[in-house]
Image: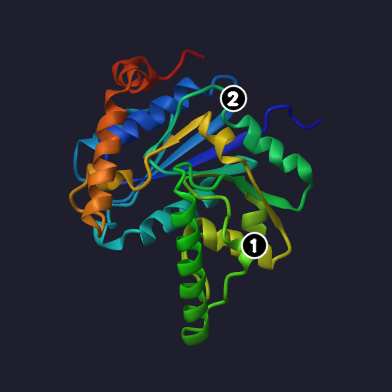
Amino acid sequence: MKPTRPRVTVCIPHWQVLRYARLCLRSLRRHSAGLDLEVIVVDNGSRDESLDYLRSLDWIRLIERPEETPANWPLNVFTAWDRGLHEATGEFFVTMHSDVFIHRDGWLRPLLAAFEGGPRIAATGAWKLELEHPLYSLQKRFVGFATDAFKSLFRGTRPIRLNERQYPRDYCAVYRTRTLIDERLQFRPLPGHSGGGLSIARQLWDAGYETALIPVPEMARYVYHVAHGTAAVAPEKPLNHRRAQKKVERKVRDLFDADWIRNLERDESLDRARAA
């Protein structure tokens, strides 16, 4: 008989963002009671106290890759998910960023429910949680489509179709583990693909599978994502535009002042293994 609670593997790439990692993992722990959850953290060469913190947690599986450096970013994020995928024991595989924080129980429910649409649905997630002005969003879509058309013409990449402009974003997306492994799909960039969630989505579509999108308001009920949040705490990874850099820094300051985040920071019990 199929278990009522599917095993789910969450894989989080990490590099020297102790405050984010602690909040991300504690939020997962607090809001995943009753779930059969496996958490894998893939460390990409941290050389600070964040690695000591991760080593102290006996309820996660830590994969250390000391050979990695910030110079390999963002490729080492994609290869971290590839590594985690082949270490995973879960029926479902969740990609997650270290600047994602769960703030409500039941966060997996709408994501897993999407797979009830049929066996050809191989991935689910939401689009960006940070809503944009409609005119700006339209401009970005036009520029993105034109840029992709240029790349397909002069670089030989497959052009993106209009219905592919939105896909499960990899900050918190869920995939059928066996589908990705059996089809030999990869998060790392392949010829004709970019990396990450778009790469996997395109590979799934090309193989005849479907992806399901969770409405942004539904996702936002459970998940808080600091888009480009690492840029606010890691000087080695600043954003290219000063205006965007200032925006994310303000967002992170406001986040750290929020009561629910402060409660997570104070609750050290979430770091310890629960009694059997």
Question: Is residue 147 placed above or below 124 in the rendered structure?
Answer: below
Is residue 199 rendered to the left or right of residue 55? right
Please tell me whether mark 2 sits on a helix, a strand or a loop.
Answer: loop
Q: According to the image, label 2 marks what residue?
A: 106
**Farthest residue toward the top?**
275
Amino acid type of the residue tagged 2 in the rendering? Gly
**Farthest residue toward the front?**
135
Residue at image location 35% in from the left, 20% down from the top = 264
Is residue 201 rendered to the left or right of residue 48? right
C-beta proximity under 8 Å, tags 2 and 1? no
Is residue 165 rendered to the left or right of residue 48? right
The mark closer to the camera, 2 or 1, is 1
Q: According to the image, label 1 marks what residue?
A: 163
Say if residue 90 shows up in the picture: yes
Please tell me whether mark 1 sits on a helix, a strand or a loop.
Answer: helix
**Pick the front one: 96 or 258:** 258
Question: Is residue 160 placed above or below 246 in the rendered structure?
Answer: below
Measured in 3D between alpha carbons, the distance from the residue under mark 2 to the one under mark 1, in whole angstroms, is 29 Å
Residue at image location 56% in from the left, 29% down from the top = 107
The image quadrant where one finds the N terminus is: top right
Label 2: few (<14), some (14–19) or many (≥20) C-alpha neighbours in 10 Å? some
Choose top left, top right, bottom left or bottom right for residue 252: top left
Say if residue 184 shows up in the picture: no
Instruction: Look at the image and name its color scheme.
Output: rainbow
